[in-house]
Amino acid sequence: MMSVLPILLLLGVLMIASVQGSPDYFEQVYKNHKYLISKHMEGFNLEKMNNRCKQLGGYLVQIDNKMEMSFLVRFWSAARSGGPVFTGITDEGSEGRFYNYNDKTPAKYLKWRWFQPDNWWGENCVELAGYRFNDKGCELTEKYICEIPL
Ligand SMILES: [Ca+2]
Ligand SMILES: [Ca+2]
């Protein structure tokens, strides 16, 4: 145990270092895309969040498969951003049919928490929460993830 501890500490430092980004975003690259998790809680809606991502050269994150989801969960955990974060998946205007807000393509990968989505009081945004998805009110104050093709 004595010899393992320094290595664990070093790994911890490296992991934190690897997710440092700008003052506003944690950054990490995966498969030719850069992902940004916002650092500040802000009151937004889908259009505003997606516009922020567009200004950075991308769009509100689209999650296409299990591998990308696993990457995001690891990134989100390492960033310790403190709480759920919005994705670009929504069922706004088509209740129960989830699609990617930016390009309106159908959502390819959905991994829901138990008893979700429940559309509680009309929830139309999808957040990454505890390794799975939950539908959440788009108007709520929360962080979000941008995806930027490199
Ligand atoms: Ca809904
Ligand atoms: Ca919900």
Image: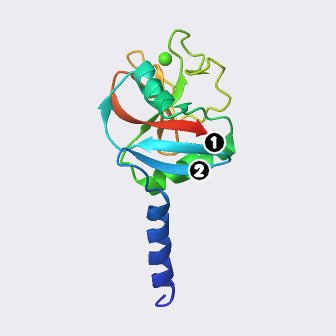
Above or below residue 23? Residue 6 is below
Q: Residue furthest bottom?
A: 2
| Residue nearest the observer in this picture, 101 or 131 | 101
Above or below residue 76? Residue 46 is above
Residue 64 spot, x, y in % from top left: 67, 34
Identified by mark 1, the residue type is Leu
Residue 121 spot, x, y in % from top left: 37, 16
Q: Secondary structure at mark 2?
A: strand
**Quarter-of-image position of residue 120:** top left
Name the residue located 61 percent from the left edge and 20 percent from the top edge: 103
Q: How is the image coloured?
A: rainbow
Residue 11 spot, x, y in % from top left: 50, 72
Look at the numbered discs 1 and 2 and tell me whether their residues touch, using CB distance below 8 Å: yes
The residue tagged 2 is 29
How packed is label 2: few (under 14 Cα within 10 Å), some, or many (20 or more)? Answer: some
| Residue 150 marker | 1
Name the residue located 50 percent from the left edge and 61 percent from the top edge: 18
Identified by mark 2, the residue type is Val
In the image, 66: left or right of 148?
right
Q: Residue furthest top?
A: 93
Residue 147 spot, x, y in % from top left: 56, 37
| Residue nearest the observer in this picture, 72 or 110 | 72
| Residue nearest the observer in this picture, 119 or 54 | 54
**Quadrant in which the C terminus appears:** top right
Q: CA distance from mark 1 to mark 2?
A: 9 Å
